[in-house]
Amino acid sequence: MELSQVAYSVSGAIAHVTLHNPGRLNAVNLVMATELVRALETAAADPGVRVVLLSGAGKAFCAGGDVAWFAEELESGEFDVADLVRSLGQVAVLIRTMPKPVVASVHRCVAGAGMGLALLADFCIASDDTSFVTAFSKVGLASDTGVGYVLTRRLGHLLAAELLMSGRSLSALDARRLGLITSVVPADELGQATADLIGGLLTGPRTALAAIKQQIWQAQFADFDRYLEQEVDLQAACAADPDFAEGVAAFVARRPPTFGRPD
């Protein structure tokens, strides 16, 4: 399988799916999203794989959407956010429905779509230098990759609205306190703590773990598919609004955005 922005390998019964565009802090564009779909489908279909490890190469797990790529696409006049959001929706469903535990091991920046990947995993272990931020509103977008769904279900609408609309960040300890992630460990212990967690899963009852995951899907995610379909429409409307172009331009220029326009 030829991949350019995702690394895929299998060691023993563990499939390693690694976001691999470290030069852009593993920011997500259409290529990466499409490759994530392929890698996760491969892991889900491999009978030898019992656990999937999702991580990021380099200095951060994922800086969210690839705003530099957004700017390039806007400049060319060919940007269609719906393709990206649909692909990210496929990724979200694969993480939640594959009959094997998915473990996210995250560090430093976990933003936007990257936050969705982390929160959708069955287990998320974070280094103590990690920050979580929704980020979407900072560039004039709604949320995608299931972030709004997970935050609202776990935190209620008031705190979800604050995090999504303000874009304020959460420390790893705050995310753990709110029940968004599994555990927080010192940065130099992340690898070992991840290995220990996966080791416990590998010795567990395979069929029972798959059944438990299916039960959780039915209990909490039964309407997830419909929610993801709505994400496509809402994100397309946001991407067509001048505020998105302003948000992208401001990000590239490293200045605060000036949203809003006269009616």
Image (cartoon, rainbow, N blue to C red):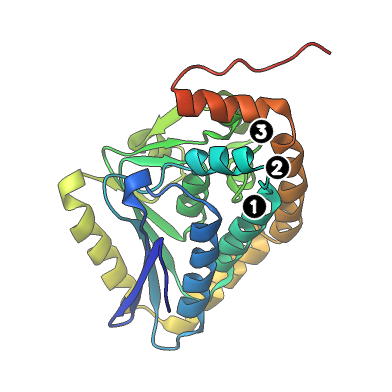
260 over 235 or under it: above or below: above
41 over 134 or under it: above or below: below
Label 2 Cα neighbours within 10 Å, binned few <14 / some 14-19 / many ≥20: many
Q: Residue at x 69, y 57 (%)?
A: 224
Q: Would you say residue 162 is visible in this rendering?
A: no
In the picture of the structure, the residue carrying the numbered disc 1 is: 85
Q: Would you say residue 260 is visible in this rendering?
A: yes
Question: In the structure shown, which secondary structural element does the residue marked by tag 3 occupy?
Answer: helix
Comparing labels 3 and 2, the label whose residue is closer to the camera: 2
- Report if the CB atoms under discs 1 and 2 are less than 8 Å apart: yes
Quadrant of the snapshot with the N terminus: bottom left
Question: In the structure shown, which secondary structural element does the residue marked by tag 1 occupy?
Answer: helix
Q: Quadrant of residue 219?
A: bottom right
- Report if the CB atoms under discs 3 and 1 are less than 8 Å apart: no
Q: Pick whichever of labels 1 and 2 is earlier in the sequence.
A: 1
Amino acid found under the numbered disc labelled 1: Val
Q: Pick whichever of labels 3 and 1 is earlier in the sequence.
A: 1
Q: CA distance from mark 3 to mark 2?
A: 20 Å
- In this view, the residue in front, 72 or 1, is 72
142 over 5 or under it: above or below: above
Residue 182 locus on image (x, y percent): 38, 51
In the picture of the structure, the residue carrying the numbered disc 2 is: 235
Name the residue at the right extreme.
Answer: 263
In the picture of the structure, the residue carrying the numbered disc 3 is: 157
